[in-house]
Amino acid sequence: MVYFLSVLPILVLIILSLTKGVKEAVYAGLLVTLVLFFYWGASFSHFLGTLGVSLMTTINILMIVFGAAFLYNIMDKTGLINGISHSLDNLETTKELKFFLLAIGLTALFEGVAGFGTPGAIVPLLLISLGFNAILSVSVVLLFDGLFSMFGAVGTPLLTGLQIPLQLPGATVQNIAILSAVAGVMVIAVLLLFVFRLFAQYNIPVKDKKQVLVLYSFFALPFCALAYFVPELATVLAALIMLVLSVLYFKGYQRNLHLQYWVPYAALAFLLLLPKLFNPLHRWIGWDISFNNMFGSNIDASLKPMQSPLIPFIIVGLGVAFFTKTQSFYLKDTFGKIITVLIVLFPSIAVAQLMLNSGVSQPSMVNYISEMLARLGNFYPICAPFIGITGSFITGSTTISNVVFGPSQLVTGESLNMPPASVLALQLSGASMGNAICLFNIIAAASIANIKNYKSVLAHNIVPTLLGGLLFGLLGWLFISFF
């Protein structure tokens, strides 16, 4: 009975998300988890401490969301986003290669600097404007985003979704990042075959498959190298590197490409990278606001406002506003984004933290779930990515999937004597892949692209997503078993 009760909050999230809606699911899940939290024997002080750490985690994420939305809205309203979108129009190459350049490069860029569904709202429209089918465009962008969501907006899924709540050391985070990135680019390389097949279904033969692979390598190789050193910037910097290499490859430097529109995001990448290049600055901004033993619960939490990407986002946003002489910071749109995210984010995090901190008088709900999963033994790695995919499919977020399922994945891996970094890399990879079939992303992108039958996008992406999960699992099983 206790095993069933331990997974009941997750079952509630899954069932109600599919039948009623995500908002209803997370609040019902929170109510069920709260009742079980006290049934598990946890005290009221532990309840207050858990709410405290949930609030701190939420604030850490919202600081990133605010900064990303602040900069993006200013750039969008002042025409810079439109400028970025059309900056490569004069690049002389085939229409199909331009499709892949935009689908990979711009999807990566907008995911890396803004996240939270932004690529699906922008890139498909550009591809449609080139003359491509709307369903094809949305499907491919979301499928590629199954890789780029791995580090999301400046590393949020990895750093805020795994490192902070699980208190992981820096070396473990580096290993998670490189393992996820290498596996991710390998899996997406295989899934390109599905993309080519999808083009064929729409009677658009891709004649330059080798050149598509060259374009993909322009992103994939820097992405893997950067993932180990600066995972929070790997997606953004790899997208910028891909742009430069593609311009050189197609001899676009001989044409007017209007690359000045990219300057704000290049400046943002520099500011985010600066503390890593200038060590004294890293020490100066390293202080945090600590909340130790909250309400006598032995639960700790902290805020690191200076280490958050919030300040670089705001600095660049103010710079854009100054140089474009805009009369508004468009804060109404920014706060609207914050509220939309907050409504689902806080209860989702609270569910995960209540399950994690329920172990006062007996093992926590997470421990019981891990005990069940551990029965898979050596084949557990094959299952692990599908847990991450399920989390993103339910919540619409790689970060929240990591927050909800990361603890049970970690405990399960430890009970099976598997390296924590390897197991959590499978969680992160699966959670990222789940964005390709997440109903929020599909509905939002399809609505903007004026697609009525959004289920056709899900039909296109479900098989490659599940295959991607299986490939991640097999790679993880091989790595854990033989290395």
Image (cartoon, rainbow, N blue to C red):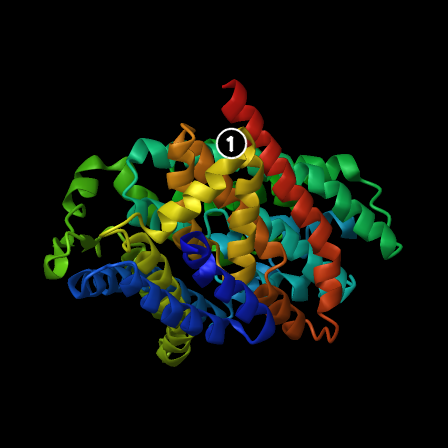
Q: Is residue 339 left or right of residue 109?
A: left
Observer able to see residue 148: no
Residue visible at 37% across and 62% down in the picture: 351
Q: Residue furthest right?
A: 203
Position of the N terminus by quadrant: bottom left
Count of marks placed on residues = 1
For this rendering, which residue is in front, 238 or 469? 469
- Give whichever of 180, 207 is nearer the camera: 180
The image quarter in which residue 53 lies = bottom left
**Residue 64 rendering spot, x and y as whole percentages:** 35, 60
At x 36% / y 37%, what residue is drawn?
Answer: 173
Q: Position of residue 270 (x, y in %)?
A: 36, 46
Camera-nearest residue between 185 and 95: 185
Specify whether 232 is left or right of 435: left
Q: What residue is shown with label 1?
A: 377
Q: Quadrant of residue 58?
A: bottom left
Query: Which residue is located at x 29 percent, y 43 percent?
Result: 274
At 46% from the left and 61% from the top, the residue drawn is 8
Q: x, y percentage for residue 183?
A: 56, 34
Residue 244 in percent (x, y) is at: 56, 42
The answer to whether residue 141 is visible is yes
Task: Decide: few, some or many residues near mark 1? Use Cα within 10 Å; few <14, some 14-19, many ≥20.
Answer: few
Residue at the top extreme?
482
Query: In terms of image quadrants, where is residue 16?
Result: bottom right
Give the amino acid type for the residue marked by disc 1 in the picture: Gly
Q: Nearer the viewer, residue 263 or 163?
A: 163
Q: Is residue 325 left or right of residue 103?
A: left
For the residue labelled by badge 1, is the local secondary structure a helix, a strand or a loop? helix
